[in-house]
Image (cartoon, grey):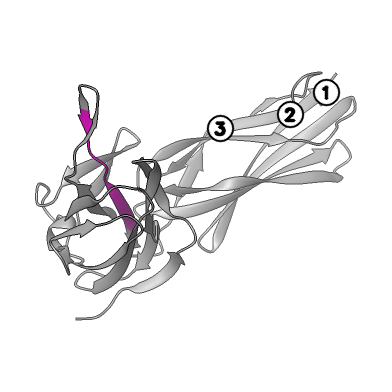
Amino acid sequence: MRVLSIATFILAVAVTAAAGGGSLSITPAAVILRGTAGQSTTQTMKLTNGSTLPFSFDLKAQDIVVRDGRRVFVEAGQLSGSVAATAAFSRKSVTIGPGESVRVDVTITIPPKPAARAILALFHGTTKLQRGSIGSTVSLGMLMTFALSDDVLSSSTPLDVHPPTATSNLAVTQQLINSGPEPFVATGMLAIVSGRGILLGRTPVPARRLLPGEWTDVRAEYPGELARGHYRALMTYQFAATSVTSAAEFDVR
């Protein structure tokens, strides 16, 4: 079986959950893959117990689909073409004591007509935490997204500019939408240009990871001082090998 290539492997960010006076963490938090139907990949998840309690988990996978612009988690096998249904874990369950770490491999295979472009490989908590009359469990997962083509497409709503005031910085807002069939990670940059076309400054916008059909609200602030006058705000998103820019003019009075 051919193996999916890793386009980006994010190791630095750990998903954490508070538990028993400490935390549980999983790395990597996300893996971005590229491939075609029929290909397989095996990834390793590391779970670390930084709490003072032992925890037990079952290993499972869920498909992630987008409905009405938002992510929905679906149990493996419920969708035709479920990617999560192909997930095979090296262990069915684990118990991890305080200060310990455990590694679990997960292998997935892309079906001919995948129902999703992302799954959640999940440490599903089975240890009950009791706080008074309320019981809860802790679960952590690794997000796996995969692209099957270079057909990346985005759209956005018009850029809405909120000029600076005596108590607030200039801010811009808009919605960014994944209007194509493939997932992407978009990095953004807000630039402010004077009425004469001179670049006054830039400020980065946190990266956004969007699945097909998903949208997100974007807000960015420009911390620089702006005198009275006419300006232009430019919001540029970079993803894959392309970029898109939206612009709006505004006045500072």
Q: Secondary structure at mark 3?
A: strand
Give the residue drawn at x 35%, y 68%.
Answer: 34
Q: Secondary structure at mark 1?
A: strand
Foreground pick, 23 / 103:
23
Give the residue drawn at x 68%, y 29%.
Answer: 171
Q: Is residue 138 magenta?
A: yes
Q: Earlier in the sequence, mark 1 or mark 3?
A: 3
Would residue 83 be seen by someone viewing this image from the given angle? no
Amino acid found under the numbered disc labelled 1: Val
Residue 6 numbered tag: none
Q: Which residue is mark 2?
A: 170
Foreground pick, 91 / 22:
22
- State which region is magenta: 135-144
Which mark lies nearer to you, 1 or 2? Answer: 2
Q: Is residue 251 magenta?
A: no
Q: Disc 2 versus disc 3: distance between alpha carbons?
A: 14 Å
Dot 3: few (<14), some (14–19), or many (≥20) neighbours within 10 Å?
A: some
Foreground pick, 201 / 139:
139
Dot 1: few (<14), some (14–19), or many (≥20) neighbours within 10 Å?
A: some
In this picture, is 227 found above or below 92? Answer: above
Would residue 3 be seen by someone viewing this image from the given angle? yes
Give the residue drawn at x 30%, y 69%.
Answer: 44
In the rendered structure, the answer to whether residue 137 lies left or right of residue 10 reads left
Instruction: Evaluate if marks 1 and 2 touch, with contact meaning CB atoms under 8 Å apart.
Output: yes
Amino acid found under the numbered disc labelled 2: Leu
Q: Quadrant of the N terminus?
A: bottom left
Q: Which residue is mark 1?
A: 252
Q: Disc 1 versus disc 2: distance between alpha carbons?
A: 10 Å
